[in-house]
Amino acid sequence: MTVVVALTSDTPAGQELHLLYNRGRPLTDADVVRAAQLVDTAGGRAWSRT
């Protein structure tokens, strides 16, 4: 659910996360780390704590 919150956050981080997921290729280890950072920045982690 946190990823959905991030993807729908209408933030630059959410937009970057959307682009990352829609590249059409599997995520690398570095991509997964970046995706986690973007979810946090876009508010997904904060949402899960409310």
Image (cartoon, rainbow, N blue to C red):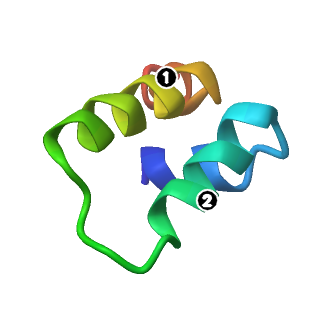
Q: Give the image quarter of residue 11.
A: top right
Residue 23 placed where, x, y %?
49, 71
What residue is drawn where x is 24% and y is 34%? 30
Residue 29 placed where, x, y %?
15, 40
Q: Amino acid at mark 1?
A: Asp
Mark 1–mark 2 contact, CB under 8 Å? no
Q: Amino acid at mark 2?
A: Leu
On the rendered structure, is 43 left or right of 29? right
Residue 39 placed where, x, y %?
49, 34
What residue is drawn where x is 44% and y is 30%? 48
Residue 10 placed where, x, y %?
84, 46
Extreme-right residue of the structure = 10
Disc with the residue nearer the chain's start (1 vs 2): 2
What crowding class fits label 1: few (fewer than 14 Cα within 10 Å), some (14-19), or many (20 or more)?
A: some
Which mark's residue is nearer the viewer, 1 or 2? Answer: 2
Residue underneath mark 2: 19
Extreme-left residue of the structure = 29
Q: Tell me, yes or no, if residue 20 can be seen here.
A: yes
On the rendered structure, is 27 left or right of 38? left
How far apart are the alpha carbons under marks 1 and 2?
A: 16 Å
In this figure, what is the number of numbered marks? Answer: 2
Numbered disc 1: secondary structure: helix
On the rendered structure, is 45 left or right of 7? left
Residue underneath mark 1: 40
What residue is drawn where x is 31% and y is 42%? 31
Which label sits on residue 31? none
Numbered disc 2: secondary structure: helix
What crowding class fits label 2: few (fewer than 14 Cα within 10 Å), some (14-19), or many (20 or more)?
A: few
Q: Tell me, yes or no, if residue 5 can be seen here.
A: no
In this rendered view, identify the residue nearer to me: 49 or 16: 16
